[in-house]
Image: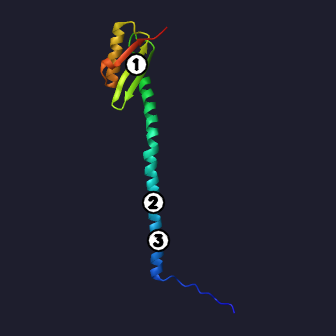
Amino acid sequence: MNKIVEKKALPPERRTRIDGRLKDIFLLSVLAFALLFAAWKIFYTNEDEEAASAVSGSESEQKISRLLEEIDGVGDANVMICETEEGVQSVVVVCEGARDLQVVINVREAVAAALGTEEKAVKIYLKKE
């Protein structure tokens, strides 16, 4: 009455087909993951790079400010670097010592040298008291 069901091993041809399908599924999964990763890198890391660029820009401004404050007669200095895709477009410096022509010359030369830009791109203004 009770039938005993014997489990038979899969024939070698069928086992090969199943192994081949598993390999295909695995390969497709890896390719899909790679495609998702590539899309993420293309569409989302650009914003991260721009944010990092903005942070490094403010770090550069802080470094230049500290450098300028070490120059005799400059006093407190604030720096704003205006950049484009080609590089530094212009630099604005507001400092306490801008009344003195020699200080203005020294600041202009220092900023131009530090950023590798032309001196005429550096604008210097007197800081209000």
Residue shown at 36%/32% (left/top)?
A: 85
Residue 6 relative to residue 34: left or right: right
Q: Which image quadrant is residue 98 in?
A: top left
Circles 2 and 3: CB atoms closer than 8 Å: no
Q: Residue furthest right?
A: 1
**Can you identify the residue that label 2 sits on?**
30
Residue shown at 35%/20% (left/top)?
A: 111
Q: Where does the image place residue 39, in percent across and percent down from the top left? A: 44, 50
Residue type pointed to by label 2: Val
Residue type pointed to by label 3: Arg
Circles 1 and 2: CB atoms closer than 8 Å: no
Question: What is the spatial separation of the Cα atoms under label 1 and label 2, in whole angstroms?
Answer: 51 Å
**Can you identify the residue that label 3 sits on?**
21
Residue 92's label in the rendered image is: 1
Q: Where does the image place residue 101, in percent across and percent down from the top left? A: 34, 7
- Badge 2, how many Cα within 10 Å: few under 14, some, many 20+? few
Question: What is the spatial separation of the Cα atoms under label 3 and label 1, in whole angstroms?
Answer: 65 Å
Circles 3 and 1: CB atoms closer than 8 Å: no
Image height check: is 26 above or below 36?
below
N-terminal label among 2 and 3 = 3
